[in-house]
Image: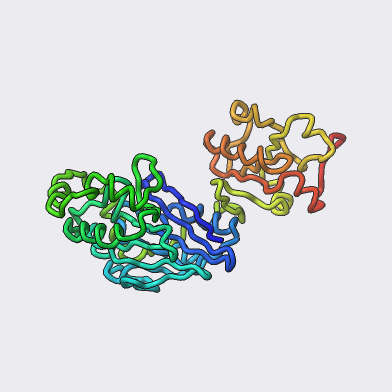
């Protein structure tokens, strides 16, 4: 079975794509974003997939790739077009090369024009293709910088992408309107820049007069992406919150093991967000916990100290307390994590429990 996820970075409107082979639990990640590495690692962990390769469709100008950081964390190889000129890749792709994950693979098609090194990655059964910035939904990548060429881009799309099966789904590198996917047939018929009988000269004229602003991140992103996102200051991001061995979840918050909470309880602010009758009920409570029901937490957040002590949220199962983390982060608390599994897991681990009589 193919595992497939489309991921989004709101800052740069970048789509990343996770593809996995469930039989082998091997996965690839296309166009990862540096700032989203913690999210991507959480998803891989939760889906029980091992990252074998990250692939970049080109050297991006609007965000820094997460390829190098993910390699440091998970060991996956870095792949990018040899024509990109990027240094530090483990695999320098040429036209027609294959990248395997388990029994599945994608084929790299050279589709230059937006940049010299642009590639489209086509799934083995040609049901899906990942076009990066070469072809967007009812649009295409710009051609006014980074070795851009309207003539090469026209040929790449017309002779490479548009020759894929009509029902092949096309997954773009960006979209700024909330659109997610298109198809070869749709773009051949309806793309205002390339569809129908639009000629190469028509397309070149269109692209020459786009009048787009200079990409805001280009002076940072391009140099970083030419070394595959490698940090030069020696500091690795997303190692954890710094104050505890917490795990980042795909839902977007830190979780902490109950055993660590028990060991460090006196140095923590433990907030139990169950209702009062639950707090006094048969499951008991974490010793020293303060009861602030979830429905009142936003209004009562001021009862918590803003000193250096981290805040740990607790409930019966870890669900309501996950929402409590979001509420406290909005209230300005930086050191906050959810206790994984709640009181059910606390009791299963036979950790000391305080009850209503204590």
Left or right side of 210 for 165:
right
Colour mode?
Answer: rainbow
Residue at the (63%, 30%) spot, across then down? 297
Left or right side of 122 for 306:
right
In this rendered view, identify the residue nearer to me: 156 or 354.
156
State the residue lying farthest toward the right: 357
In this rendered view, identify the residue nearer to me: 231 or 87.
87
Quadrant of the image occupied by residue 57: bottom left
Location of the N terminus (image quadrant): bottom right
Residue at the (32%, 68%) spot, across then down? 81
Vertical position of residue 158 compared to residue 300: above or below: below
Query: Picture coordinates of residue 114 (x, y %)?
Result: 24, 57
Vertical position of residue 264 compared to residue 59: above or below: above
Query: Picture coordinates of residue 356 (x, y %)?
Result: 84, 34
Query: Picture coordinates of residue 118 (x, y %)?
Result: 29, 62
Vertical position of residue 324 compared to residue 43: above or below: above
Query: Picture coordinates of residue 223 (x, y %)?
Result: 29, 61
Q: Can residue 224 be seen from the camera position used here?
A: no
Residue at the (62%, 37%) spot, across then down? 324
């Amino acid at each position: 079975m193919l595992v497939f996820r489309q991921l989004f970075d709101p800052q740069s409107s970048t789509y990343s794509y996770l593809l996995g082979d469930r039989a082998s639990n091997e996965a690839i990640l296309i166009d990862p974003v540096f700032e989203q590495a913690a999210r991507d690692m959480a998803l891989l962990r939760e889906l029980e997939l091992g990252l074998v390769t990250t692939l970049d469709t080109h050297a991006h100008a609007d965000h820094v790739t997460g390829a190098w950081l993910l390699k440091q964390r998970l060991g996956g190889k870095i792949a990018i077009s040899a024509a990109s000129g990027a240094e530090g890749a483990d695999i320098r792709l040429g036209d027609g090369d294959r990248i395997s994950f388990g029994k599945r693979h994608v084929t790299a098609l050279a589709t230059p024009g937006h940049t010299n090194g642009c590639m489209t990655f086509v799934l083995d059964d040609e049901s899906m293709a990942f076009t990066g910035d070469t072809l967007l939904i009812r649009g295409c990548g710009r051609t006014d910088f980074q070795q851009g060429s309207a003539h090469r881009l026209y040929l790449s799309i017309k002779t490479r992408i548009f020759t894929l099966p009509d029902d092949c789904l096309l997954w773009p590198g960006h979209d700024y309107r909330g659109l997610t996917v298109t198809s070869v047939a749709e773009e051949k018929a309806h793309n205002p820049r390339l569809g129908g009988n639009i000629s190469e000269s028509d397309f070149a004229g269109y692209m020459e007069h786009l009048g787009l602003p200079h990409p805001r991140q280009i002076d940072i992103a391009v140099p970083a992406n030419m070394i595959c996102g490698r940090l030069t200051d020696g500091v690795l991001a997303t190692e954890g919150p710094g104050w505890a061995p917490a795990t980042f979840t795909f839902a977007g918050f830190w979780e902490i093991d109950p055993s660590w909470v028990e060991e460090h309880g006196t140095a923590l602010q433990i907030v139990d967000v169950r209702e009062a009758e639950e707090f006094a009920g048969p499951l008991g409570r974490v010793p020293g916990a303060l009861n602030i029901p979830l429905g009142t937490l936003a209004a009562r957040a001021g009862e918590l100290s803003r000193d250096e002590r981290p805040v740990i949220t607790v409930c019966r199962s870890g669900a309501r307390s996950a929402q409590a983390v979001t509420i406290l982060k909005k209230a300005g608390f930086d050191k906050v994590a959810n206790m994984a599994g709640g009181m059910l897991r606390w009791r299963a681990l036979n950790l000391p429990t305080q009850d209503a009589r204590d």
